[in-house]
Amino acid sequence: MTKTIRIGTRDSELALWQAHTVQYQLQQLGYSTKIVAVKSTGDLILDKPLYELGITGIFTKTLDVAMLKGEIDIAVHSMKDVPTALPQGIVQAAVLERANVLDILVHKGNLDFLNSEGTIATGSLRRQAQWLNKYPQHNVVDLRGNVNTRMQKLQDNDWNGAVFAAAGLERINLKPENYIDLDWMIPAPAQGAMMVVAMENDEFALDALSQLNHIETEICTYIERQFLRTLEGGCTAPIGALAKYDENNDTIDFHGVLFSIDGQQKLEIKRAFDISEWKKLGFNCAKEILDNGGTELMADIKSKLKK
């Protein structure tokens, strides 16, 4: 019997693009598939900043529930939105080859504000902190919604620009002419990568998805997410991490940062490790930051977010 794999996804344009990409790859391997779209709480509540909703994984929760209820077999996520601890019974089944990792600034054709006062929009604490670290004279406002909604809000408001993940805009051909690469901004852990999850006892789906896994991306995102998990322990904080494999030297170049919310404080680690160290690399780098002021900074961030 051939089983049809039901692919769960949020119903935003980007989420559907990601689901269709996985669907196409599975169909190329001869699997029968079907897309099931669901609305997430994160898409429905747009008037509160994400960290105020108090849940990590707000975009993944609805799909987790659908999977645990048996309504879908697999779910496709932007990996940076997935909490580092998955619900019991659900496992990471594949990480697809990573796209562009950069953040970009979408602006309105005039960059003079970079040298004076300006207003930038982002719903991410990580982007906010890094922006204020570089441009302390600027004002940062909250921006929520899916990619299309955020692009529209940028047009409708008198902000100078907004920060987006390049990969999301490139995937749905929304990247405008007026943008600059923010190559100084350390991306979110696993930015640019897509993760597919399945039930741990669903051998049919796990076997199918294992054929889509990109090992280099899997290892690099594992390191970044381990760094994140060790630092934050379940709360949201301005954390950036990027691991890159250097095939010439067989090393992993890692760059991790933790900022205070206002961007004034910055703790950073940047170095190359032998590939053999990958399993504990994220943990060890996070420990180093925690031992050098990170523990106090994380406590401060947690107390500020609770207010």
Image: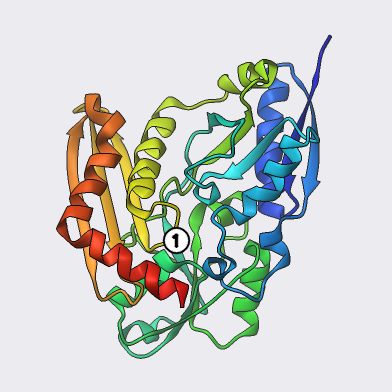
Asked where in the image residue 126 lies, by quadrant, the reply is bottom left
Query: In front: 12, or 261?
Result: 261
Quickly name the residue at label 1.
236
List x then y, in percent, for residue 61: 65, 49
List x then y, in percent, for residue 65: 72, 43
Residue 124 appears left or right of 176? left
Q: With respect to residue 282, does 162 lie above or below?
A: below
Residue 193 appears left or right of 255? right
Within-10-Å neighbours for mark 1: few <14, some 14–19, many 20+: many
Point out the residue furthest to the right here: 1
Asked where in the image residue 283 lies, by quadrant, the reply is top left
Identity of the amino acid at label 1? Thr
Q: With respect to residue 280, does 147 lie above or below?
A: below
Residue 35 appears left or right of 144? right
Q: With respect to residue 107, does 14 lie above or below?
A: above
Taking the spot 56% from the left edge, 37% from the top edge, the residue there is: 195
Taking the spot 57% from the left edge, 54% from the top edge, the residue there is: 168
Taking the spot 18% from the left edge, 62% from the top edge, the residue there is: 293
List x then y, in percent, for residue 240: 35, 56
Taking the spot 26% from the left edge, 36% from the top edge, the residue there is: 281
- Looking at the rendered image, the quarter that the N terminus falls into is top right
Asked where in the image residue 299 lies, by quadrant, the reply is bottom left
